[in-house]
Image (spheres, grey):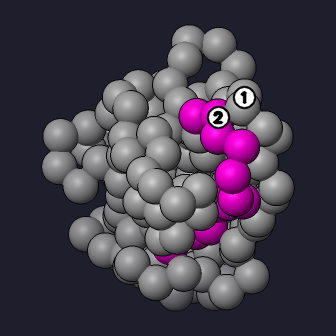
Amino acid sequence: MPTVPETKAAWTNGVDALSSTNLNAYLRDPIRFLMGKPVARLRQTVIQGLVNNADTPLTFTSEDVDTDPDGIGGHSTSTNTSRYTARYTGWYRVGGAVAITGNATGFRGSSWLVNGAILAGSKIYLPNNGSGAAAIPARPMLVRLVEGDFVELAGYQNSGAILNSFVSIGEFVSSMDVTWERL
C-alpha cells in the first residue's frame, strides 16, 4: 500500500542538501498528494432488497469519481461493491444518503460501518413519509481509516418485510461520498 508523503519538520543547514531528490520528496510529492487526494462519489444504480430490522450495506455500481494520487481509487464496481477501502491511512470525511421505496409502516434509517461494525454515533432513524419514496441522509462524519480498512453506508427499515432501495435518475438515489482529509 502507498503512504502519504510527508514534509520535513525542519531543514538543517549543511545536513539537508537542497537537491532535486529532496525537493521532490519533501515538497513536490506532498503537494501532488494534496492536489489529488483520495476522493470517491458512488451511486446506486441497481435496486437492492433491504432486510427488515437490519443494517444492510448498500451496493454501489456507479462511480462519478474514484481516484487517488496513484489513479487506482478505493472502490470496485465488480467486487465488494458496498465498500470503499482506504489505500492511505488518515481521517476521511464521509457523507451520503439512503433512498428507500415507499411503505407506510415503520422507520427508515442510515448508519456507517467500518470493517463491518457500526460506527458509534452514526445512526439516524426517521419516521417514514407514508407511501412515497424517501431519501434518508447519512450523518456526515470524520472516520479514521488505516490502509486496508473499509467503510460502508448501511440502510435500515423496519416495515415488517424486505423493502427495495429506490433507484432513479433524479433526486432520489442512494449515494456515498468519501474524501481523505488529513493524517
What's the residue type where badge 1 is placed? Answer: Gly
Let me know if residue 85 appears in the view.
yes
User: Which quadrant is home to the N terminus?
Assistant: bottom left
- The answer to whether 46 is drawn above or below residue 3 in the figure is above
Q: Dividing the picture into quarters, in which one does residue 87 lie? A: bottom left
- The answer to whether 5 is drawn above or below residue 37 in the figure is below
The one nearer the camera, 51 or 56, is 51
The one nearer the camera, 145 or 23, is 145
What's the residue type where badge 2 is placed? Answer: Gly
Let me know if residue 153 appears in the view.
no
Residue 123 coordinates in the image, percent (x, y): 70, 72
Bounds of the magenta segment: 101-113
- Circle 1 packing at 10 Å, graded few (<14), some (14-19), many (20+), is few
Q: Residue at x 76, y 65 (%)?
A: 125
Question: Hey, which residue is sitting farthest top in the picture?
Answer: 169
Q: Dividing the picture into quarters, in which one does residue 47 lie? A: top left
SS at circle 2: loop
User: Which quadrant is home to the C terminus?
Assistant: bottom right
| Magenta region includes residue 70 | no
The one nearer the camera, 128 or 20, is 128
Q: Could you tell me how far apart the alpha carbons at marks 2 and 1 are, in whole angstroms?
A: 4 Å
Q: Which residue is mark 2?
A: 102
- The answer to whether 144 is drawn above or below residue 81 in the figure is below
Q: Residue at x 64, y 40 (%)?
A: 103
Q: Residue at x 58, y 34 (%)?
A: 101
Q: Residue at x 72, y 28 (%)?
A: 132
SS at circle 1: loop
User: Looking at the image, do the residues carrying marks 2 and 1 touch, with CB atoms under 8 Å apart?
Assistant: yes
User: Which circle's residue, 2 or 1, is located before the other in the chain?
Assistant: 2
Q: Which residue is mark 1?
A: 132
